[in-house]
Image (cartoon, helix red, strand yellow):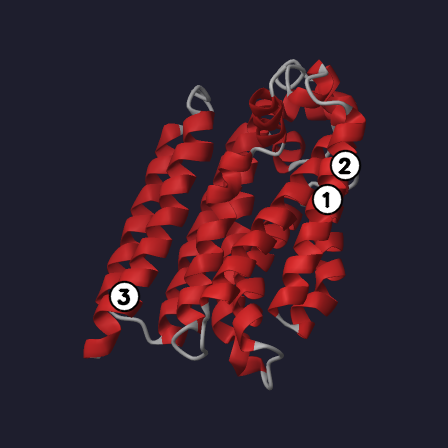
Amino acid sequence: MTVGEKLADYARLVRFSHSVFALPFALASLTLAGTRYQVSAAALGWIVVAMVGARTAAMGFNRLADRKFDALNPRTRAWELPAGKVAVIEAVFLTGAAAIVFVYAAYRLNPLCFYLSPVALAVIFFYSLTKRFTWTSHLFLGLALSLAPLGAWLAVSGAPREAGDIQVPALMALAVVFWLAGFDIIYAIQDYRFDREQGLFSIPARFGVAKSLAVSSVFHFVTVVFLALVGLSAGLGPIYWIGIAAVAGVLIWEHRLVSPNDLSRINKAFFDVNAYVSLGYLAATALDVFLAAPGR
C-alpha cells in the first residue's frame, strides 16, 4: 500500500470531507468577530488548524469507541477499522496526534483558548459515549460542533468582559446545536432497528421514524430562529437575511427528501443538503459583512 492510499484511508476513517459542516460556521463567527476585533492571518491559520485537529481527534475517538458496533452493523462493517484497513493502534496514534495538534493550535491563539482546550476535547469525546445511555445523544453531537463558532470568536476576542461580548457566537452556537441534531436524527434513522437490538439510544430508536422526522423538523425550525437572532444581535443587513431565507428553503427541501415511506435519499439529505446550508450561511454572512457593511 502506498503512502497516498494509507492517507486516504485515514481521511475516510475520520470522514475528513465532513469538515464542511462545522468549519464554515467557525469562519462565519470569525467574520462577525472581525467587525469588532482585529483578525490576523496567523489567527485565521491557527483557527483552521485547531478545527481540523479537534474534528480529527473527535472522529478518531468515535471510531475507536464504536468499533465493536460498527463491526456488527451491516451498514458500517466495511468501514476502515472493522474492515482492518486501519489498525486500532494507528487510529489511537492518529487521534492522539490530532488532539496534540489541537491543543498546540489553541496555545498559539491565546491563553484562554489554551486553558479551555482540554474542556473542549472532553466535550467532543464525551459525545461518542452518550448513545449508550441517552436518546438525546444527537444534542450532545450538536454541542460538540457548536464549540466551533464559540472557539473561533474567543480566539480573536480573548476573555469576554461581560455576557454581551459573546452573545453573537453563543446564538450561532445554539443554531449549530439544533441544526446538527436535526440532521443527525435523520441520519440515525438508518440504524434505528440495529440500535434497538444492541441497546443503543437515539431518537429514532426511541420514537420511531415518523416522530423522529417531526422532531428533526422542529429542531431545524429552531435553527432558523437562532440564525435570525444572530442577524439581529450583529445588526446584519439584507444580504444576510436573504441568506437566512435560502437556508430555511434548503432545510425545507431536506425534509422533503426523506419521509417515513421513502428513506432512500437519507445520504443526500445528510451530506449534500447540509453542505449547502453551512457553505451558504458562510457566504451570506461574509458577503453581508464585506460588501454591505461599509454602506450601512
- Direction from residue 38 to residue 245 in the image, left or right: left
Q: Residue most toward the left?
A: 295
Q: Contact, CB < 8 Å: mark 3 with mark 2?
A: no
- Direction from residue 39 to residue 110 in the image, left or right: right
Q: Nearer the viewer, mark 3 or mark 2?
A: 2
Q: Position of residue 173 (x, y in %)?
A: 53, 61
Q: Contact, CB < 8 Å: mark 3 with mark 1?
A: no
Residue positioned 63% across, 42% down in the render: 56
- Direction from residue 54 to residue 172 in the image, left or right: left
Q: Which mark is residue 93?
A: 2
Q: Contact, CB < 8 Å: mark 2 with mark 1?
A: yes
- Using the rendered view, name the quadrant where residue 66 is placed: top right
| Residue neighbourhood size for the residue with mark 3, other residues' Cα within 10 Å, grouped as few (<14), some (14–19), many (≥20) | many
Amino acid type at mark 3? Asp
Pick whichever, 222 or 123, lies toward us: 123
Q: Is residue 143 above or below residue 276?
A: below
Residue positioned 56% across, 59% down in the render: 46
Q: Nearer the viewer, mark 3 or mark 1?
A: 1
Is any atom of residue 227 visible in this view? yes
Residue positioned 58% across, 47% down in the render: 52
Distance from disc 3 to disc 1, alpha carbons, whole Å, reads 37 Å
Q: Which mark is residue 288?
A: 3
| Residue neighbourhood size for the residue with mark 2, other residues' Cα within 10 Å, grouped as few (<14), some (14–19), many (≥20) | some
- As helix, strand or loop, the secondary structure at mark 3 comes to helix
Residue beneath disc 1 = 97
Q: Position of residue 73 (x, y in %)?
A: 69, 17
| Residue neighbourhood size for the residue with mark 1, other residues' Cα within 10 Å, grouped as few (<14), some (14–19), many (≥20) | some
